[in-house]
Image (tube, helix red, strand yellow):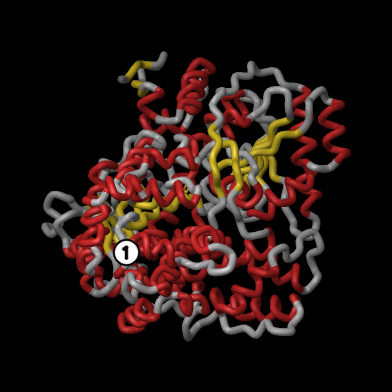
Amino acid sequence: MKKEDKNNKTMADPMDCTACRSTGQMITKARKDGVVLNFDRAEDMKACPIGADSACCKHCFMGPCRFNARDPYKKVGVCGATIDTIMARNFARTVAGGSAAHTDHGMAMLELFRDVVNGKILDYEIKDTFKLESVAQSLDIETEGRSVKEIATDLYQELERTYTQVDGEIPFVKRAPKATLETWRKLGIVPRGAMREVVEMMHRTTMGVDQHYENITKQASRTALSDGWGGSMVSTEISDILFGTPTPVEVAVNMGVLKENMVNIIIHGHEPNLFESMLVSVGSETLVQASKDAGADGINLVGMCCSGAEMMSRHGVPHAGNFSSTEAIMVTGAVDAMAVDIQCIKQGLASVAKCYNTPLITTNTRAHMEGAVHIEFNEHDPLGCTDEIVIKAISRFKTRTHEIEIPSEVNTGVQGFSHEYIQYMLGGSFRGGYAPLNENIINGRIRGVAGVVGCTNPRTKQDDSHVKLVKELIKNDVLVLLTGCAQIALAKAGLSSPEAAHFAGPGLQEVCETVGMPPVLGLGSCVDNSRILIAASAMVAQGGLGDSIADLPVAGAAPEYMSEKAIAIGQYFVASGVYTMFGVTFPIVENTKFHNLLFNGLEEQGLGKWGFEKDPIEMARSMIAHIDKKRAALGIDKARERVLVDMSDRREL
Ligand code: SF4
Ligand code: MSK
């Protein structure tokens, strides 16, 4: 349903924009307050159809050149480039952009680790020495009888190769199943070093360099793998070592976590160090007293987007909402400061913050914004920044003038399922491992595993596809692993609690009830998708489900993605052997050679493949069909038929 605003612009009904009631409530209030949000801008700024199909090129100034998606081979660019070259180059640059984001984030984490180890940074320490040792052992670093500092120094030196190495193989590819690694070697796509791959990708896609869509796609796979098994994986592992590996924790999610009588501070972005130091600042007696002197009951620190997802998983910090809600939450009038670091931070936040007199504070040297206050975060004096953020928030609380309207929704669920905890949960502390998961897949109680990840996007109803897709998957006995904004969508829908097992099919429900786990397991932020790769490798290593990730009855999806990072993640899952489906839109022209390569050809090479579907139920069906195809290839399809026939027996059991 659409209405017109005072300028006669059509405005979508708030509940057509989002499945999140709190966000819908805030869209309504924003319109009353005359404030424009991302949802309204998406209505106003229609997507360029040529760009959406990736049928244009502006890689040189003989162009831009554009093609007609209905007749893509009718024309070539001024340089003679074909539609396949153009689409492949655009796609590859998107992969390079996303991979660069994860790589730069990972490099920052590794640099922090180095300076903690060598004693130059004193505000952080190695919290998880068990994880330090297990990561070191996975890279054949000697741990027996050695000090933490010795092991950590060697680990730093080894992992630095992930980024800086110019030849050879990045360290973590050792963790991939042997057959998967052999396929990469055969295809020549084992990453050498993340910086080399991203730079080479950018070079190859400039005008007049690589002009064969297959060769460009090969380098796109190599670049994406340098992210998944490199930049992102290093980031996750180092963050766990420094700040602790997540274990299940009950967490409150949704806008109702804001408190009217407290100083509310939101952290939004991707790097955990800012948030870790904020936790210290909000615990400071002096600052808590200052908040009370200002008339508040204390300080309420909450997260949003992916740094929120990471801190929710690691420390149980309440989470207020995902990507599409970051502007809407300021409409509550109750946000006394929002501090941001890197990635997925909409510039539109600045104007919304101004409307509600909320300090919007940028903290990272890489990410300034017009209209925001910049207080640089420096790991050598982190509290210098975070204390100042708290002080700004307290003074905004003291001078609150806006009407406060906090939606009442709060959803409680269990988060924080790291790969390490999944092993322990399924196998127990003495025989931790994936045997019970594999056994339940082989016997058919669990049909397969799906990773549902990625953003929300105001071009599609927020959270709606995530929730419908996941409900359909678990109803069909598919265990779902979640990260990033998808994880928050499902938490808000109440699927993260063990009681949600009743949404699952009989086989998955039985497993969830036996273990006491929810049917969806939240693994953390978007950079933590590397945990899914490690879990998939552990499933292969456990045995009984084939030799490579491509053999597993698994599938992946990002039904509401918006970021370049999501395309990089999709490509590293595809290159790792996973059928990966995206929704909303896909930057490709159908009935072209490049389309056929991504959607079929890569699978024929022994990798995974891409899929695209806007309808979440159809998406679930395609994923389930793929899982069943893999089950049949493994010869375990009959077991599942028996499980379904034996339902009453199992009930008795
Ligand atoms: Fe046009 Fe070729 Fe230049 Fe692209 S590289 S803008 S297709 S001339
Ligand atoms: S924050 S990349 S909107 S998941 Fe990681 Fe969310 Fe997507 Fe950003």
Judge whether residue 642 can be spotted in this image.
Answer: yes
Q: Secondary structure at mark 1?
A: helix
Establish if 450 lies above or below 21: below
Quadrant assignment, res 251: top right
| Residue drawn where x is 74% and y is 84% of the image | 145
Horizontal side of residue 424 vs 435, given as left or right: right
Q: Is mark 1 within 8 Å of ligand 2?
A: no
Given residues 215 and 295, the one toward you in this image is: 295
Which residue is located at x 49 percent, y 52 percent? 515
Asked which quadrant contains residue 431, the reply is: bottom right
Label 1: how many Cα within 10 Å (few below 14, some 14–19, many 20+)? many
User: Is residue 361 or residue 76 the one in the foreground?
Assistant: 361
Number of marks in the image?
1
Q: Vertically, is 47 above or below 571?
A: above
Residue 361 vs residue 567, the one in the foreground = 567
Q: Quadrant of residue 408?
A: top right
Percent of width and height locating residue 255: 57, 30
Choose between 238 and 369: the one closer to the eye. 238
Q: Which residue is mark 1?
A: 442
Q: Residue 539's spot in the image, x, y percent?
A: 41, 68
- Residue 307 image offset from top left, x and y in percent: 59, 49
Is 629 rendered above or below residue 41? Answer: below
The amino acid pointed to by label 1 is Ile
Q: Left or right: 20 with respect to 308? A: left
Q: Whole-percent x and y of residue 36?
A: 48, 26
Look at the picture and state if 199 lies above or below 522.
Answer: below
Residue at (58, 50) in percent of width and height: 248
Q: Residue furthest front?
A: 652
Q: Quadrant location of the N terminus?
A: top left
**x 77%, y 74%: residue:** 118
Image side of residue 469 versus residue 399, left or right: left
